[in-house]
């Protein structure tokens, strides 16, 4: 087994992404499946999540967990720009050399018949060589706009798990607390509650928004936090959450 670790072809992997970012009971089934994948008990996973539910952050966390914990080789691809820039799907050739292939934004494969055929053949090669593959998409395989029916059949055979929507307030609090603990950050109660009520619903976007208010953290650590600072932090959270929502809508089409 190779211990060579290859970075993503197209996915800007978040080096601090961690499976510990995904807290709450709703994440337990998919987290258990990811651990079974790392132990070699599963060969394929199909993970479903609508836009803004943390698929890309999870893809980065899986990559980090798999390569660091199990010392296996992995590669992660995000299909959006790759499909547009590689008409004949040549990027898929030879990927079966890796122990694990992670394919994010799978639903965008509807843009190219060549990529559908290339992925179909890649899955066959992965199975023949007893490697592993993870798909992340916004809908189950049979609901994706894929014209190649043989590919739909292949994808449908993978164990499928759906990410929680994080509409449950306790799940969101557990998620945010986990991120703050890992980063050794503290938020005063008004900012914490505002993040829960008006901030993003997934780990990756939460971290991005927290990064934007990080210059204020020295003030936010005080016992008595100025109202001006709290209002400024809320304004940043509201603005950045809105921008992330717009970005998610664009990427998901």
Image: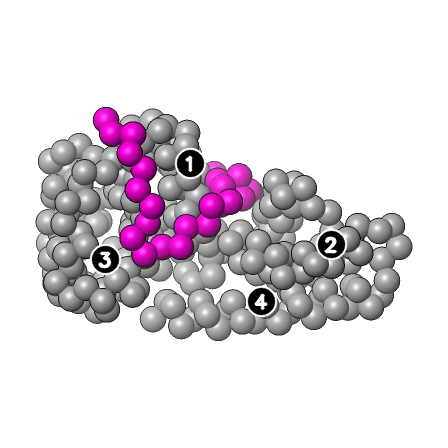
- Earlier in the chain: of badge 1 and badge 2, it is 1
Residue found 60% across the figure and 51% down from its top: 172
Q: In this picture, is 110 found above or below 203?
A: below
Q: Quadrant of residue 214?
A: bottom right
Q: In this picture, is 68 found above or below 193?
A: above
Looking at the rendered structure, the secondary structure element under dot 2 is helix
- Earlier in the chain: of badge 1 and badge 3, it is 1
Dot 3 alpha-carbon crowd within 10 angstroms: few under 14, some 14 to 19, many 20 or more: few
Measured as percent of width and height from the top left, residue 130 is found at: 17, 32
- Earlier in the chain: of badge 4 and badge 1, it is 1
Nearer the camera: disc 3 or disc 2: 2
Nearer the camera: disc 3 or disc 4: 4
Residue found 41% across the figure and 32% down from its top: 68
The residue to which callout 3 is attached is: 142
Q: Is residue 94 left or right of residue 191?
A: left
- Earlier in the chain: of badge 3 and badge 4, it is 3
Q: In the drawing, what numbered circle is on residue 217?
A: 2
The residue to which callout 1 is attached is: 65
Q: Is residue 16 visible?
A: yes
């Amino acid at each position: 087994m190779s211990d060579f670790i290859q970075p993503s072809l197209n996915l800007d992997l978040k080096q601090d992404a961690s499976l510990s970012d995904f807290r709450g009971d709703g994440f337990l089934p998919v987290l258990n499946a990811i651990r079974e994948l790392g132990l070699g008990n599963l060969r394929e996973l199909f993970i479903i999540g609508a836009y803004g539910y943390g698929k890309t952050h999870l893809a980065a966390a899986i990559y980090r967990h798999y390569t660091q914990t199990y010392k296996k080789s992995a590669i992660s691809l995000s299909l959006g720009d790759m499909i547009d820039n590689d008409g004949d799907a040549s990027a898929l050739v030879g990927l079966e050399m890796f122990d694990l292939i992670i394919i994010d934004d799978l639903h965008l494969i509807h843009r190219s018949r060549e990529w559908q055929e290339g992925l179909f053949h890649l899955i066959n090669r992965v199975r023949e060589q007893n490697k592993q593959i993870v798909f992340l998409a916004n809908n189950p395989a049979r609901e994706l706009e894929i014209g190649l029916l043989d590919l739909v059949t292949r994808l449908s055979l993978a164990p499928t798990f759906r990410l929680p929507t994080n509409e449950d307030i306790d799940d969101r609090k557990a998620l945010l607390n986990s991120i703050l603990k890992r980063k050794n950050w503290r938020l005063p109660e008004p900012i914490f509650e505002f993040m829960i009520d008006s901030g993003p619903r997934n780990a990756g976007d939460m971290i991005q928004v927290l990064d934007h208010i990080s210059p204020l953290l020295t003030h936010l650590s005080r016992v008595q936090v100025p109202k001006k600072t709290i209002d400024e932090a809320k304004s940043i959270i509201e603005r950045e959450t809105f921008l992330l929502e717009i970005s998610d809508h664009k990427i998901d089409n």
